[in-house]
Amino acid sequence: MFGKIRCLLGAKKSFAAIDMDAATVRIAAIKFCSGRIVLEGLYSFPVYPGVFSNWLNGDGEDLTAVLTEAAKECGLKGKPVVTSLPGDRVITRHIQMPAMPAWEMQKALEWEAKKFIPVSLHDMVIRHVQLGEIIVSGARKVNLLLMACSLRLLHRYYEMFKKANICITALDLQPFALWRVLGEECWNPFPGKTIAAVDIGVSYCHLVVIKRGKVRYTRGFPLKGLAVELRRSLEFYKKHDSGTDVEALIFSGGVNRISNMKDYLEGQINASIKIFEFFEPAYVVAVGLALRGAVK
């Protein structure tokens, strides 16, 4: 997956990323050395109760202080990092459209966004990613992931990192970070199979379906009702991707939150279930974000 990138990077090149939720700031530092991904360091810093919600409500001093201390201890002051917005703050929708030129697609998406994004688009940033082609009712369609988030929230996020003396070079989605890690054969326990990677957050989960090394479907949902939401997501994916079954689920993030649910999930979902174990599962998103730094 990253073979060409490694050759371009040369013998050694380092990248860092920050993954943050309501409980923890996680930092991953990686490097490419002689064609291999090497983990230089995985670090975590606690976010005390109420600090994250205070930031969402306009008081960001305490969260900025956590970031500042983390950057100081990890040597990130003034250095570029990749990060992501809180997952429940980014609206995503999958849509299918006929193939068309890029300029025409952009215009069509402006209309489609009004139908699929359930909030006013005023002061919203809209982006899309093409996820390949699928067959819908016998017709070939382009599978698109539509994304929207508040411009005001983006500005506040960048401003907080700037105050902490951290330079954001890219904002990514957590599902794409999962894909970058599980797309590496050395970290995928089910090579060649259609898999779903599920990252467990404090109160929110991210899912990405990977087929033949490519992202086919993503979804975010609350941790509460995990089994039901997983089953719905996999059924929706199967219906919209030529009846493809997900053969295995790989869990990362706060896997301790579902430790007593593994047997139940296996009874509810017809797929192999495994906890990510190649490095500490809480850092999978952070490492995937750091890998995004290599794709420039």
Image (tube, grey):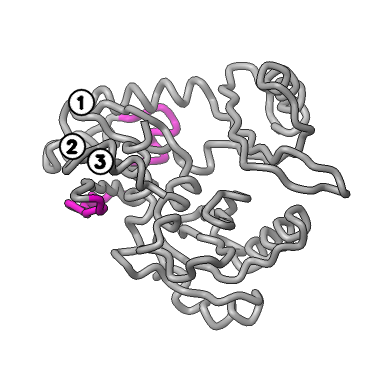
Residue 137 visible in the shown view: yes
* Residue 40 magenta: yes
Mark 3: give few (<14), some (14-19) or many (20+) Cα within 10 Å. many
Quick check: 1 left or right of 73? right
Q: The C terminus appears in which quarter of the rendering?
A: top left
Q: Nearer the viewer, residue 68 or 209?
A: 209
What span is in magenta?
35-60
Residue placed most toward the observer, 126 or 293: 293
- Name the residue located 63 percent from the left edge and 82 percent from the top edge: 267
Badge 2 marks a residue whose secondary structure is: helix
Asked if marks 2 and 1 touch (Cβ < 8 Å), the reply is: yes
Asked if residue 57 lies in the magenta stretch, the reply is: yes
Which image quarter: residue 5? top left
For label 1, the residue is 165
Estimate the spatial distance between the alpha carbons at disc 1 and disc 3, rounded to whole Å: 14 Å
Residue carrying label 3: 16
Q: Quadrant of residue 101?
A: top right
Q: Residue at x 37, y 48 (%)?
A: 288
In the depicted structure, whether residue 280 falls above or below residue 102: below
Give the structural element (helix, strand or loop) at label 1: loop
Crowding near the residue tagged with mark 1, few <14, some 14–19, many ≥20 C-alpha atoms within 10 Å: some
Can residue 50 be seen by looking at this rendering? no
When the figure is inspected, residue 163 is found, relative to residue 25, above or below; the finding is above
Q: Which residue is at 25% across, 54% downward? A: 36
The residue singled out by tag 2 in the image is 71
First in sequence: mark 2 vs mark 1: 2
Mark with earlier residue (3, 2): 3
Crowding at dot 2, Cα within 10 Å, few <14 / some 14-19 / many 20+, comes out as: many
Q: Nearer the viewer, mark 3 or mark 2?
A: 3
Q: Amino acid at mark 2?
A: Ala
What residue do we see at 34% from left, 44% from top?
A: 291
The amino acid sitting under disc 1 is Asn
